[in-house]
Amino acid sequence: MFGLAKSRRLRGALAGTVGVGLVLGAAACSSSSDSSDDDTASAASIDCAPYKTFGDLKGKTVSVYTGIVTPEDKAYKDSYKPFEDCTGVTIKYEGDKSFETQILVRAKAGNPPDLAIVPQPGLLKQLVATGKAVAAPAEVSANVDKFWGADWKAYGTVDGKFYAAPSGASVKSLVWYSPSEFKDAGYTVPTTLDELKTLTDKMVADKKKPWCAGIASGEATGWPLTDWMEDFMLRLSGPETYDKWVNHDIPFNGPDSTAALDAVGAYLKNPAYVNGGLGDVKSIATTTFQEAGLPILDGTCSLHRMASFYAANFPAGTKVAEDGDVFAFYLPGKDATSKPVLGGGEFNLAFADRPEVKAFQTYLSTDTWANIKAQASQGWISANKGLDTSKVSNPIDKLSADLLQNPSTTFRFDGSDQMPAAVGSNAIFKQMTNWITGQDTKTTVDNVEKAWPAK
């Protein structure tokens, strides 16, 4: 059982808030030459020829099951219309907040949908293990080879067989800041971890508490610290060691993960560095993650490490842009050339191999769909290399999309979402919370290691 709590709670916390009242620093644009000027692209705006090879599909239906609900579902439904118009297929969309538990129930009972939008590689593996999922068709595999990196294809692969093309993506390796504060104080965006430390110390010398943080999130309290730790695992030990750590090929309490947590502690457990505008170190545990970055707006903190979706939490009228009230920069690596990026994403997994399902999977794996979907959605991006990032709807999404498409980027999926539930959505959250309120690093990593299920 893989950890599901973090992504589920994030979706619930953010549902209905994305973009509310924000001034995102860019006018809405048409997404690509593949889309029309209408709100929803028409069939004429895409090439229908690739779908004719699947035969006469008119009158067929494909069911889609997902945890993406109102209001985010509208953009998905709209993005499917060009395919429906091309092929005559009807897409039956079902959004369910209980998706991540119910999809397993349905698969095991032999009643799965034709296609599921799966939010973690761990859940995807569980669904494949039911024996109900089907491998992706050759057309989808070819598109993924063309439009995504090998790392993304690997997340949709189980036991050497490719099942699911990537869909949307998010970037977690970001630090929020005030562009005007940086300009007025003469601060520059750091390009290495050493420069980040130097910037932090400069802010302390300027009589500031540089960092603000909060990890309170109901039953999932502690999850933001897992992102901090995962980011430092990637940066200090590299992607190969990160993969071994996530898969428990090396122990959770080994030297690499211990060093990563200590590196996080050098920031978040340093009373000179935190918790600007919110309290002392222990206040991190009682401050909600939604509230934690808001002190940037009044200048009582300067830096907040949080994912791209955090834009939704700033109040109405906040301009999120490089010249705005707040923006974000990439959390740098050890050097200026390497680009380790922590993030999340979704995958399109099929449970049927009928021609209409294969055709729809193929459409969803194209650059055409990625651009149509990006136009239809504020706050949605993809790692699809065919996405035209110059036409992404707002600056924070463009920053994230550019990072995902950077040839130097090494992407890794959120670690705790891939770990067994006893660890990834239980022990690690609790132990991180204990750690920020005073527990030492060794006890913390030892306790998480003890929670790991025996193989």
Image: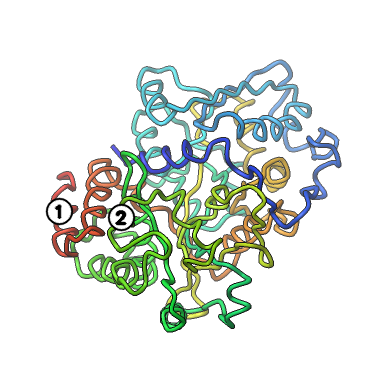
Identity of the residue drawn at 50% across and 35% down: 349
Identity of the residue drawn at 63% across and 62% down: 325
Would you say the residues marked 2 and 1 are in contact, meaning their CB atoms lie under 8 Å apart? no
Q: Earlier in the sequence, mark 2 or mark 1?
A: 2
| Up/down of 346 relative to 328, above or below | above
In terms of image quadrants, where is residue 49?
top right
Closer to the camera, 207 or 225? 207
Q: Which numbered disc covers residue 242?
A: none
In terms of image quadrants, where is residue 45?
top right
**How many badges with numbers are in the image?**
2
> Whole-percent x and y of residue 89?
70, 22
> Whole-percent x and y of residue 415?
35, 53
Query: Gap between marks 2 and 1, in whole Å?
Result: 16 Å
| Up/down of 18 relative to 153, above or below | above
The amino acid type of the residue labelled 1 equals: Asn
> Which element is circle 1 on?
helix
> Which element is circle 2 on?
helix
Closer to the camera, 319 or 425? 319
Identity of the residue drawn at 71% across and 47% down: 371
Callout 2: few (<14), some (14-19), or many (20+) C-alpha neighbours within 10 Å?
Answer: many
Q: Which numbered disc covers residue 246?
A: 2
Callout 1: few (<14), some (14-19), or many (20+) C-alpha neighbours within 10 Å?
Answer: some
In the picture of the structure, the residue carrying the numbered disc 1 is 447
The amino acid type of the residue labelled 2 equals: Val
Query: Could you tell whether 451 is left or right of 153 in the image?
Result: left
Identity of the residue drawn at 46% across and 48% down: 290
Query: Could you tell whether 399 is left or right of 349 in the image?
Result: right
